[in-house]
Image (cartoon, rainbow, N blue to C red):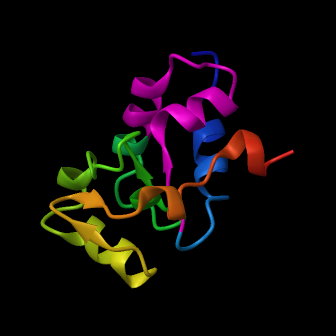
């Protein structure tokens, strides 16, 4: 992937409150359709940076795959504070909360 972690963080900072996106959607927006894993590495690396709302990045099925990096249920708590319902580590009604950067950012 030709993009840097900072390119990824810039996109993540634009995810609106109460919305989520996937690793793959970010990678596709940045021109690296197969770069979801790299986006995941970037999310793992930003642990503790409150300026990056990493809790809004989930896998394509809405599963909180980054949960371990937040400790306990912190990722779920942050999402629920934004009005997103999470059951069994998965966002309920994902389509109602899913934000697609390539469609939203022009």
Q: Determine if residue 53 is in view.
A: yes
Between 57 and 53, the residue placed more toward the observer is 57
Residue situated in front as seen by the camera: 2 or 60: 60
Q: Is residue 81 left or right of residue 27?
A: left
- Residue appearing at x 46%, y 59% in the figure: 56
- Is residue 7 shown above or below 12? above
> Which region shows up in magenta?
19-42
Q: Position of residue 32 (x, y in %)?
A: 61, 19
Residue 77 on the magenta span? no
Pinpoint residue 90: horizontal percent, then vertical percent.
26, 57
In the picture shown, does residue 63 fall above or below 77? above
Q: Quadrant of the N terminus?
A: top right
Q: Is residue 24 magenta?
A: yes
Q: Position of residue 53 (x, y in %)?
A: 49, 62
Q: Residue at x 39, y 83 (%)?
A: 81
Front residue of 77/7: it is: 77
């Amino acid at each position: 992937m030709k993009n840097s972690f900072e390119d990824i963080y810039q996109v993540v900072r634009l995810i609106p409150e109460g919305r989520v996106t996937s690793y793959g959607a970010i990678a596709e927006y940045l021109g690296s359709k197969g770069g979801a894993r790299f986006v995941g590495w970037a999310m793992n690396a930003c642990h503790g940076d409150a300026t990056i709302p990493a809790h809004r990045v989930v896998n394509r099925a809405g599963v909180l795959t980054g949960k371990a990096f937040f400790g306990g249920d912190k990722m779920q708590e942050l999402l629920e504070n934004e009005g997103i319902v999470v059951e069994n580590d998965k966002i309920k009604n994902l389509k109602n909360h899913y934000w697609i950067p390539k469609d939203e950012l022009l």
